[in-house]
Image (cartoon, helix red, strand yellow):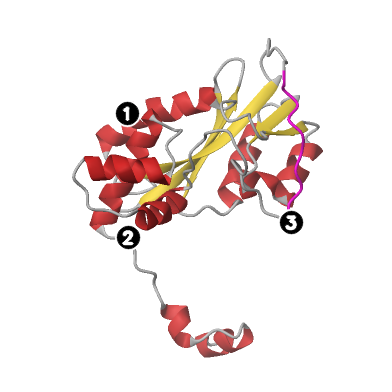
Amino acid sequence: MVSIQQQCDLVRLSRSAYYYTPAGESQENLHLMRLLDAQYLQTPFYGSRRMTAWLQGHGYPINRKRVQRLMRLMDLEGVAPGPRTSRPHPAHPRYPYLLRDVQVIRPNQAWCVDITYVPMALGFMYLVAIMDWYSRYVVAWAVSNSLEADFCLEALEQAFAQERPEVFNSDQGVQFTSQAWIDRVERAGSAVSMDGRGRVFDNIFIERLWRSVKYEDIYLRDYATGRE
């Protein structure tokens, strides 16, 4: 059996780093993040400047730098059209948008995917959902405590166990431009489509889903854990 010290030596990791547990966000920051999340559902075009002004207008003495950090943590970004509205990983491929002027008239013609921040009683998680554009049916979903791509791939496998779309549309987030995601979608025989500049409202159906899920369930239930 390899000791913890030997394991740390093998990966060049200190013992203190091995035992380190990162501190979670303060209750104040969690409260601010919940406020930002609720406001973002109402005004997704708000960037950090307008979010800062909105919070200050409601009596919170907060600066823009702090709002920017919390929005990055929540994976929120104002959706106003313009340069760099989507920030893919610089090493990841970009694919064209395939649904311009296309009428979606049948199930499994086009799917979309998106990630949202989920506040809990203590802490937060992320929720990914894959939706059929025609029926608005949620084909698959998964939750995670990080924005690594693994939980998105888990939802993808659940979805492909049921059906395969002709076109699979996403934004240019790093989870959906990763090679693992692209390879799996293409192996399923689906065409990869990605939102580009000026396509900020293409995921309006899944944004409506987030609003319903949060206001009709998550905000009311105040879940304590991801498992719950």
Which amino acid, by three-letter code, is at mark 3? Ala
Across and down, in percent, residue 181 comes to 70, 45
In the image, which disc is placed on residue 21?
none
Which residue position is annotated with label 2?
25
Residue shown at the point (44%, 41%) measured from the top left: 47
Q: Give the main secondary structure, helix, strand or loop, of the magenta stretch.
A: loop
Residue at 37 percent across and 50 percent down: it is: 124
Q: Quadrant of the C terminus?
A: top left
Between the residue at mark 3 and the residue at mark 2, the CA separation in whole angstroms equals: 30 Å
Q: Position of residue 54 (x, y in %)?
A: 30, 39
**Closer to the observer: label 3 or label 2?**
3
What is the three-letter code of the residue carrying label 1? Tyr
On the question of residue 121 being in view, the answer is no
Dot in front, 1 or 3: 3
Among the two numbered marks 1 and 3 on one chain, the one whose residue lies closer to the N terminus: 3
Who is closer to the viewer here, 21 or 3? 21
Q: For this rendering, which residue is in front, 127 or 50?
A: 50
Residue assigned mark 1: 215
Please name whichever residue, 61 or 25, is drawn nearer the observer in this view of the structure: 61
Left or right, 77 with respect to 220, comes to right
Q: Which residues are magenta?
A: 91-100
Q: Quadrant of residue 195?
A: top right
**Label located before the other in sequence (2 or 1):** 2
Residue 185 visible, this angle: yes
Q: Are marks 2 and 1 in contact (CB under 8 Å)?
A: no
Q: Residue at x 38, y 57 (%)?
A: 65
* Mark 3 Cα shell of 10 Å, populated few (<14), some (14-19), many (≥20): few
